[in-house]
Image (cartoon, grey):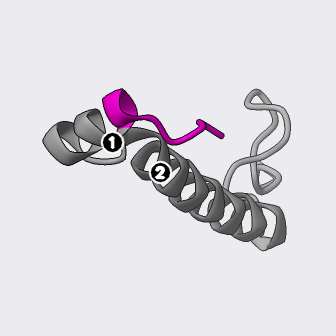
């Protein structure tokens, strides 16, 4: 991404390689989110589609 320069090398030495750290965190978040979305898409919904519809029909009176 960046062409190696003395200024960049000095910043990396002082602060760490921030772009690499950010990229690593973004990859981790992406993997975590993919897992959550996969679980959500395969799980049965615990609530009805319409919150006003009961889950089970009322008993006859």
Question: Which is more toward the observer, 21 or 35?
Answer: 21
User: In the visual, does 32 lie left or right of 59?
Assistant: left
Question: Which is more toward the observer, 21 or 34?
Answer: 21
Kindly state the secondary structure of the residue where label 2 is placed.
Answer: helix
In the rendered image, residue 31 lying in the magenta stretch gets the answer no
Write the residue at 33% across / 42% down. 9
User: In the visual, does 50 lie left or right of 33?
Assistant: right
User: In the visual, does 56 lie left or right of 23?
Assistant: right
Quarter of the image holding residue 49? top right
Kindly state the secondary structure of the residue where label 1 is placed.
Answer: helix
The residue indicated by pointer 2 is 20
**34 above or below 29?**
below
Residue 9 is tagged as 1
Counting other residues with Cα less than 10 Å from the Cα at mark 2, is it few (<14), some (14-19), or many (20 or more)? few
**51 above or below 39?**
above
Counting other residues with Cα less than 10 Å from the Cα at mark 1, is it few (<14), some (14-19), or many (20 or more)? some
Residue 42 is tagged as none
Question: Magenta stretch mostly in which secondary structure?
Answer: loop
């Amino acid at each position: 991404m960046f062409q190696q320069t003395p200024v960049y090398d000095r910043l990396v030495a002082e602060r760490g390689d921030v772009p690499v750290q950010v990229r690593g965190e973004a990859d981790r978040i992406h993997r975590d989110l993919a897992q959550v979305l996969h679980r959500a898409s395969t799980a049965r919904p615990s609530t009805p589609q319409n919150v006003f519809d009961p889950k089970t029909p009322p008993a006859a009176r």
